[in-house]
Amino acid sequence: MLEIFIKFLAPLALVLCVPVMAQERNAWQFGFLPANPSVSKPDDQQVYEVLLKMLDRWNAHDIEGYMQLYWKSPELLVVRGSEQFNGWQQLHDSYVNGYPNRSAMGSIELVRIQVRLVKPDLALALTWWTINFPSSHQKVVGTTTMNLQKFDDGWKIVASHSGANEM
């Protein structure tokens, strides 16, 4: 029975679980089809792509590239579990010191992304994710809520909160 599910129903389940982009403005946006690169992308899609870039940089174990997506300001606020980081530099240093061996970062899979434009230059994003650590066979599942602001150089995370559970 499990073989039948994996072979036939799992691909269908994946298709059915891919959310459809909402039509109403200011509604939650769930996922996007590839846009025509010659056309300016809507802000909600730009935010979505920032989140995908974060995933890509984390999985490449590129802390510097990952940190470029955060607002480089002492006013940046990031909360991870019970830890609070005030400012870009403090967050940066925690990653650099916390992962001297970059392969220890594991790899992230995004399960779901939701994006909502609150104002023309402010977005709220929610992500559900899983991090796998192959060397220890650990798995961590969690969620992150982020506020992103639009600056001249693009969308940046200005505040975030993550919670996780080890599996």
Image: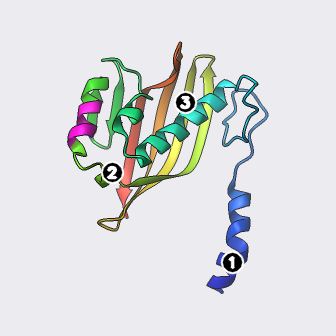
Q: How many marks?
A: 3
Q: State the residue lying farthest toward the right.
A: 23
Q: Earlier in the sequence, mark 3 or mark 2?
A: 2
Judge whether 84 appears above or below 122 on screen: below
Residue 160 location (% of width, % of height): 41, 33
User: Please, what is the three-letter code of the amino acid marked with disc 2?
Assistant: Met
Q: Which residues are magenta?
A: 92-97
Residue that badge 2 annotates: 105
The label nearer to you, 3 versus 2, is 2
User: Please, what is the three-letter code of the amino acid marked with disc 3?
Assistant: Leu
x 45%, y 29%: residue: 69
User: Please, what is the three-letter code of the amino acid marked with disc 1?
Assistant: Lys
Closest to the observer, 134 or 60:
60
Residue that badge 1 annotates: 7
- Label 2 crowd (10 A; few <14 / some 14-19 / many >=20): many
The label nearer to you, 3 versus 1, is 1
Quarter location, residue 72: top left
Give the structural element (helix, strand or loop) at label 1.
helix
Q: Earlier in the sequence, mark 3 or mark 1?
A: 1
Is residue 41 found left or right of 82 in the rendered image? right
Residue 77 location (% of width, % of height): 35, 26
Residue 28 location (% of width, % of height): 66, 36
Q: In the rendered structure, does residue 161 fall within the stretch colored magenta?
A: no
Q: CA distance from mark 1 to mark 2?
A: 32 Å
Residue that badge 3 annotates: 124
x 70%, y 40%: residue: 32
Quarter location, residue 121: top right
What secondary structure is the magenta-colored segment mainly? Answer: helix
Is residue 21 found left or right of 69 in the rendered image? right
x 33%, y 40%: residue: 80
Q: Quadrant of the N terminus?
A: bottom right
- Label 3 crowd (10 A; few <14 / some 14-19 / many >=20): many
